[in-house]
């Protein structure tokens, strides 16, 4: 069972992702409403994988990704973005994101992606 931290400013999106993951055997160990809280929770919880929204208040997903990877270069972060944010997704991958998922996404796709990333050796 992989441990997941969900970082997204939309409560609805966190709930959707959490429901999909828990239904498929993941353990959601924490949720965060912005990048600042996400970085703090990552350091506290040390999840196997993080889903990170790109566009959030206070600290963007890309800045949170950079902060997490600076503290833990082996961190496995999967970016979640809306259509039309290709440049931001590219920047995230260049800064260490392991993969990305485009909203709206299918349950099968998010489960398959997170399983593959979490199972990888650092």
Image (tube, grey):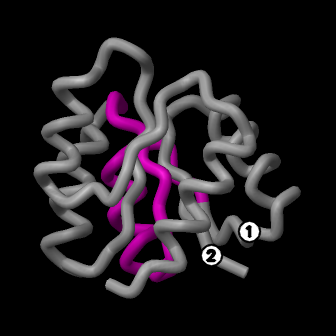
Left or right of 61 on screen, residue 62: left
* 61 in relation to 105, above or below: below
Specify the farthest residue to the bottom.
121
Residue shown at 30% from the left, 43% from the top: 61
- The residue where tag 2 is placed is 3
Q: Are marks 1 and 2 in contact (CB under 8 Å)?
A: yes
Mark 1 Cα shell of 10 Å, populated few (<14), some (14-19), many (≥20) = some
Q: Secondary structure at mark 1?
A: loop
Residue 120 belongs to the span the image colors magenta: no
Between residue 37 and residue 23, name the one nearer to us.
23
**How far across and down, in percent of the image, does residue 71 sit?**
19, 78
Q: What whole-number distance in Å separates the C-alpha atoms at marks 1 and 2?
A: 6 Å
Name the residue: 21% across, 45% down. 92
Q: Taking 80 as reference, is 12 above or below it?
A: above
**Tag 2: Cα neighbours inside 10 Å, few (<14), some, or many (≥20)?**
some
Q: Is residue 66 left or right of residue 33?
A: left
Q: Please give the name of the residue rendered at 21% of the width and 49% of the height, measured from the top-left corner.
A: 93
Res 26 label: 1
User: Percent x, y for residue 4?
Assistant: 59, 67
Q: Considering depth in this image, is 60 or 92 the residue closer to the camera?
A: 92
Taking 85 as reference, is 77 left or right? right
Please provide percent x and percent y for residue 97. 28, 55
Can you say which quadrant of the picture contains the N terminus?
A: bottom right
Q: Residue at x 20, y 60 (%)?
A: 96
Q: How far across and down, in percent of the image, does residue 122 sit?
A: 32, 84
Q: Nearer the viewer, residue 11 or 75?
A: 75
Residue numbers of the magenta segment: 31-56
SS assignment at label 2: strand
Q: Earlier in the sequence, mark 1 or mark 2?
A: 2
Q: How many marks?
A: 2
């Amino acid at each position: 069972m992989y441990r997941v931290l969900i970082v997204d400013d939309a409560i609805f999106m966190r709930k959707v992702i959490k429901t999909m993951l828990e239904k498929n055997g993941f353990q959601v160990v924490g949720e965060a409403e912005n990048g600042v809280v996400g970085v703090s929770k990552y350091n506290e919880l040390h999840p196997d994988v993080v889903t990170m929204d790109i566009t959030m208040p206070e600290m963007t997903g890309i800045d949170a990704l950079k902060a997490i990877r600076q503290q833990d270069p082996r961190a496995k972060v999967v970016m979640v973005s809306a259509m039309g944010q290709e440049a931001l997704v590219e920047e995230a991958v260049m800064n260490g994101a392991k993969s990305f998922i485009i909203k709206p996404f299918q349950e099968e796709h998010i489960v398959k992606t997170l399983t593959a990333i979490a199972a990888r050796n650092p």
